[in-house]
Image: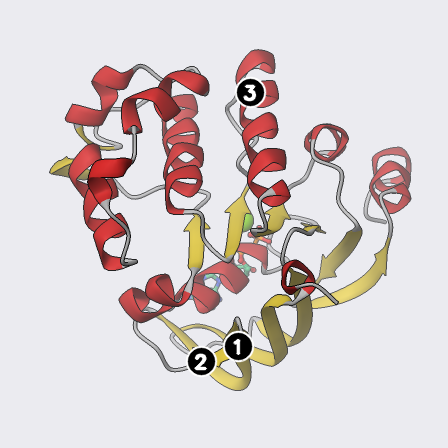
Amino acid sequence: MTASREIALKVEGLRGGPFGADVLKGVDLEVHHGEVVALMGPNGSGKSTLLHLLMGHPDYEITEGQVWVDGVDVTGATVEERSRAGLFAAFQYPTELPGVPLEDLIREALTARGRDAEDVSVDEMARQIGMDPALLTRGVNDDFSGGEKKRSEVVQMEILRPSIAILDEIDSGLDVDALAASSERIREIAGQGTGVLLITHYKLLLDHVPPTTVHIFVDGRIDRSGGPELAAELEEAGYK
Ligand SMILES: Nc1ncnc2c1ncn2[C@@H]1O[C@H](COP(=O)(O)OP(=O)(O)O)[C@@H](O)[C@H]1O
Ligand SMILES: [Mg+2]
């Protein structure tokens, strides 16, 4: 067994929610390195809550269960420790940080992960995904359009090369060309060994970035799991 098939993210019996609310009711999940796993489910089923709990959002509390990144228990870790452990999150509604240039954020994150920030061509990576490099000098997400925010998240992910990337509705607000370009980058980074958890409502993203497993989330837990055919079935029949 090669290192690239080891487990990047493992979640066991996870419960919790905003201020400890019982939104997640026992979630078990595994994503291997180089693997794309999709998480689908109706609005309000707790998908974004899962991401906030995994990332250690200060308003969210894990009441039960455990989370490991590359075998390291990060259940009680700070956001920074999780990030250093190799966890990366693109939130459904990315935070705006006016006054913090995006390029500074990226270089700091690289240094925190022990990488030489000077060796990375941030401009080039931005261009590849069709993002105007001029955005790098602006405040993070400050007055970015919806699509620009999503592209900026993909660029950050690509530069950081995390162990596990969780992307919450990365396809929302992207036009057809931007979706294709972002999908290509996501496939590429999975090909380089990052485990990817895609939270989405739409099969279209999964046509571009084929998952090995699709989980359907209902009322705070995984209700059904299957292959990509599950996404097709959903599109036909809806969540009912
Ligand atoms: N402070 C809170 N206390 C209790 N429940 C909350 C709180 N904030 C959000 N929720 C509920 O958590 C549920 C899951 O929301 P969310 O994770 O955003 O779902 P999804 O991303 O799947 O659409 C929703 O029913 C929402 O109303
Ligand atoms: Mg959501």
Lower position in the chain sequence, tag 1 or tag 3: 1
On the image, the x and y values in percent for residue 61 come to 41, 77
SS at badge 1 = strand
Residue 58 in view of the camera: no
Residue 93 x, y percent position in the rendering: 40, 41
**Ligand 1 within 8 Å, label 1 CB:** no
Q: Nearer the viewer, residue 198 or 234?
A: 198
Amino acid at the residue labelled 3:
Ala
> SS of the residue at dot 3?
helix
Q: Is residue 14 left or right of residue 51?
A: right
136 on left or right of 17:
left
Find disc 3 in the rendering and name its residue: 181
Residue at image coords 69%, 62%: 5
Q: Give the answer, above or below, for where 199 lies relative to 118.
A: below
Closer to the observer: label 2 or label 3?
A: 3
Q: Residues within 10 Å of mark 1 (few under 14, many from 20)?
A: many
The structure residue drawn at horizontal position 44% and vertical position 18%, both measured from the top left corner, is 128
Give the x, y percent position of residue 57.
Answer: 35, 65
Question: Looking at the image, is 133 positioned above or below residue 203?
Answer: above
Residue 67's mark? 1
Identify the residue at horizontal 20%, vertical 38% (top origin). Answer: 118
Q: CA distance from mark 1 to mark 3?
A: 31 Å
Image coordinates of residue 102 in percent, x first then y, are: 21, 34
Among numbered discs 2 and 3, the one appearing first in the sequence: 2
Give the class, few, some or many, for how many residues have Cα within 10 Å of label 3's Cα (few <14, many ≥20): some
User: In the image, what residue type sits under mark 1?
Assistant: Val
The amino acid type, in three-letter code, at marker 2 is Thr
**Ligand 1 under 8 Å from disc 2 Cβ:** no
Q: Give the class, few, some or many, for how many residues have Cα within 10 Å of label 2's Cα (few <14, many ≥20).
A: many
Mark 2 = which residue?
75
The CA distance from mark 2 to mark 3 is 34 Å
Q: Is residue 15 visible?
A: yes
